[in-house]
Image: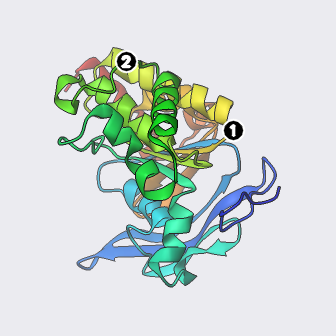
Amino acid sequence: MKSRKGCPFELPQPGAPLITYREVYKSFNGNGVLKGVNLEIVCGETLVVLGRSGSGKSVLTSMLVGLLEPDAGSVAISGLELTELSNEQQWDRLRLQIGYLFQGSALYDSMTVGENIAFPLIHHKALSAEEMAAVVRTKLAMVGLKDIESLEPSALSGGMKRRVALARTLVMDPKIIIYDEPTAGLDPISSDTIAQLITQLHDSLEVTSIVVTHDMRMARYVADRLAMLFEGKIVFLGTGQEMEECNHPEVRNFISDTALMKTGVK
């Protein structure tokens, strides 16, 4: 598959590896978080990355947009070695292809909903005010919202804020979307709405999706495959059914503990 205009990498055919981690290490203050991670993410799939707090889930995805760099090892997108990108211009070209939904939504309180969503367009596309407004309406409709452009984030519920942030994530038409704990802090109904949106957008936009979460209910709903981090390495990679049948003790403990958390059992 040929690259799009301005895209620094060529997209492989669906089913071929798009993102590869090879022997990736990362430490903070002498504490090893990633200890030789090896992982391939297939073009067109939804991969869910699981693990306990502090296991390195967000560290792994942050490397794809240059928020963090590996101490050692290789991170590549369709053969483009990210550790070899030498300046911010190269990173900016890459970041325009990757949508990143931050855990806390990260909306600008001083801007309206419409201004939040249009923010990337203002900086990266030469559009008229009318064209920009049309894009904002389209992206809001894609996340099930309309006629809220003039509202401020403070007027929105937690679930609506997350959907507005998702609309902003979509505004540059990315081919890779990273969701960092997309249901954190949301009630079950809002969480289910976000899970449904992740699946709908994945199918309609034909994107590669990476979902970082500890929410097993949501993970089972959206995942083509699941990867689990434990003690700095991938200890499981496979389908939901394969995970249910996996005998690795930490996988069993994680599934059991998250089930107890959902029921409120201490």
Kindly identify the residue that appears in the image at 23 percent across and 78 percent down.
Answer: 29
Q: Is residue 217 left or right of residue 6?
A: left
Q: Is residue 157 left or right of residue 176?
A: left
Q: Residues within 10 Å of mark 1 (few under 14, many from 20)?
A: some
Query: Of helix, strand and loop, which one carries label 1?
Result: loop
Kindly identify the residue that appears in the image at 37 percent across and 32 percent down.
Answer: 164
Kindly identify the residue that appears in the image at 50 percent across and 61 percent down.
Answer: 95
Counting residues from the N terminus, which is met first, the one under dot 2 or under dot 1? 2
Residue 12 percent location from the top left of the image:
78, 57
Residue 27 percent location from the top left of the image:
33, 75
Alpha-carbon span between mark 2 and mark 1: 27 Å
- The residue singled out by tag 1 in the image is 206
Given residues 198 and 120, the one toward you in this image is 120
Q: Which mark is residue 147?
A: 2
Amino acid at pointer 1 = Glu
Quadrant of the image occupied by residue 60: bottom left
Q: Is residue 221 above or below residue 20?
A: above
Residue 180 percent location from the top left of the image:
39, 45
Q: Quadrant of the N terminus?
A: bottom right
